[in-house]
Amino acid sequence: MPAGAPILSAAQMAAAEAACAARGIVPADLMERAAHAVAREAARFAAGRPILVLAGPGNNGGDAYGAACLLRAAGCDVRVAALGEPRAGAAAAMRARWAGPVTSLADAPPRPFVIDGLFGTGMSRAFDGEAAARLCEDAFILSIDLPSGIDADRGAALGDAIRADVTLALGSLKFAHVAGEAASRCGHVLLDPIGIDVSSSARTIARPRINPPAAAEHKYSRGLVCVIGGAMGGAARLAAAAAARGGAGYVVLASDDRRTPLDAIVHREPDARSDTIADVRTSALLIGPGLGRDAAARAACAQALASDLPLVLDGDALALISIAALAARRSPTILTPHGGEFDALFGAGDAPKIARTVAAARASGAVVIHKGADTVIADPEGNVIVANPPSWLSTAGTGDVLAGLVAARLAVTHAPMRAACEAVWLHQRAAGLAGAALVADDLPMHVPQAIAECR
Ligand SMILES: NC(=O)C1=CN([C@@H]2O[C@H](COP(=O)(O)OP(=O)(O)OC[C@H]3O[C@@H](n4cnc5c(N)ncnc54)[C@H](OP(=O)(O)O)[C@@H]3O)[C@@H](O)[C@H]2O)[C@@H](O)CC1
Ligand SMILES: Nc1ncnc2c1ncn2[C@@H]1O[C@H](COP(=O)(O)OP(=O)(O)O)[C@@H](O)[C@H]1O
Ligand SMILES: [K+]
């Protein structure tokens, strides 16, 4: 996935395209550039294999006809199968340029390399993809802009959507490249800006820059993280270990369980929880991993919310707070809900995940890390960063590790959106370093290497 790349809705993409026209770059120019980009990548990936171009009735099909012409001119073995016929504009002109035969999808024999140019951002309703599926079954598939059959904004498959090996996004990434079910249908995502200027408040995550501590720093100035433990000691220990490896200067763990994951982590008795929450030296307080939901947990949450400390709320804590109490806070707050916790706190709703996460950040005044295969980070100003972490993270306790990293980065940076992005990047990188079949305990030890890569 291209790092730090803008992400647009279909409507925002169309507006950017219209703005090009105002600068004298007409749709035919953009389609020409798109066709060149598709032909370039197709030639590279096909590597001499016979190519079948699937062309649809809209501009996605126009890109496909344009690429077919360029590939044939370059000596490639190209056939075209079409669904509908472009009727007007740049797409019709590209169609007219293709002098070779065009068969229906049903009549086309399969070929080992398919360029999928059936539908892009204009996909509006479910499509019967049976004939396309037959042609794609054993082929390497390069999708133009989006795998056909995807809702560009929601990332939902509309009927029989295509599953691509490589998707070449044109102009900008769309929400479907990073969010929802569609993200896993895109395969490897490439982006060609085709000369369109785009700006967006939503971007893909990029490697952060993390500097070593300045020479004058000491353990307290580096950031004191306090982790409040509860019913399940292991969760708080995972979080504390991650906070220590995540660059905090000092980590305190207040819990019933005297065991700490590292000797460097200071244990405090649970009856000192209230003193810990009141400790003004604390740079970031983490509450929630393994907390439980009993009266003591509720009281600790209420005290944490009422404090002026920078706060990270995870797990059980998210079930013990209200949006109103969050909105009343003046200090930085970061929430780290998974999908179920998010729905319970903010409501399920039909809107796309990115829009729901932005609304949650606005309503709560907090930075929200809405976790999952498409992790959406939003701040109350509407800035959004999206990450697609490795699926091996889908195992118990990895969220506790993330919460500890968030607390560490908040303690160090004092900037909640930056802290959230740094933590999510370090978490996914540590997962990549830990590799297949990782368990949550493996992650903290890989965080120093991930930080070392952030110079
Ligand atoms: N962004 C940019 O700057 C640039 C964008 N470019 C390219 O344009 C693409 C967007 O093009 P687009 O808007 O023409 O839409 P597209 O995806 O081709 O499909 C629309 C057609 O499909 C039809 N249709 C829809 N659903 C259907 C169904 N279920 N079953 C059957 N038909 C269905 C629909 O029919 P209608 O709904 O109107 O009846 C209409 O005819 C974009 O993804 C990129 O590749 C580049 O050329 C250059 C720069
Ligand atoms: N399929 C997946 N692909 C990528 N990341 C995932 C997937 N499932 C879960 N994750 C990540 O794993 C972590 C799980 O967090 P959470 O559900 O709170 O687990 P726990 O409470 O057991 O620690 C989150 O960072 C989440 O984004
Ligand atoms: K397509």
Image: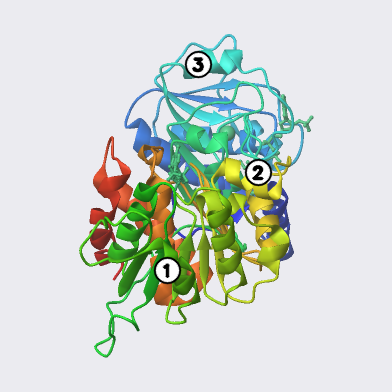
The residue tagged with tag 3: helix, strand or loop? helix
> For the residue marked with disc 1, what is the amino acid?
Ala
Q: Residue at x 32, y 47 (%)?
A: 431
> For the residue marked with disc 3, what is the amino acid?
Leu
Q: Residue at x 44, y 53 (%)?
A: 230
The residue that label 3 is drawn on is 135
The residue tagged with tag 1: helix, strand or loop? helix
Looking at the rendered structure, which numbered label has been put on residue 245? Answer: none
The local crowd at label 3, few if under 14, some if 14 to 19, many if 20 or more residues have their Cα within 10 Å, is: many
Question: Gap in Å between the C-alphas at discs 3 and 1?
Answer: 66 Å
Work out whether 239 lies above or below 442. below
Q: Is residue 370 visible?
A: no
Counting every numbered tag in the picture gives 3
The local crowd at label 1, few if under 14, some if 14 to 19, many if 20 or more residues have their Cα within 10 Å, is: few
**Quadrant of residue 65 in the image?**
top right
Foreground pick, 186 / 168: 186
Q: Quadrant of ligand 3?
A: top right
- Name which of mark 3 and mark 2 comes first in the sequence: 3
The residue that label 1 is drawn on is 272
Foreground pick, 279 / 444: 279
Which residue, as the protein is rendered here, is positioned at the far right? 88
The residue tagged with tag 2: helix, strand or loop? helix
Q: Quadrant of the C terminus?
A: bottom left
> Residue 19, position in %: x, y?
71, 62
Looking at the rendered structure, which numbered label has been put on residue 343? Answer: 2
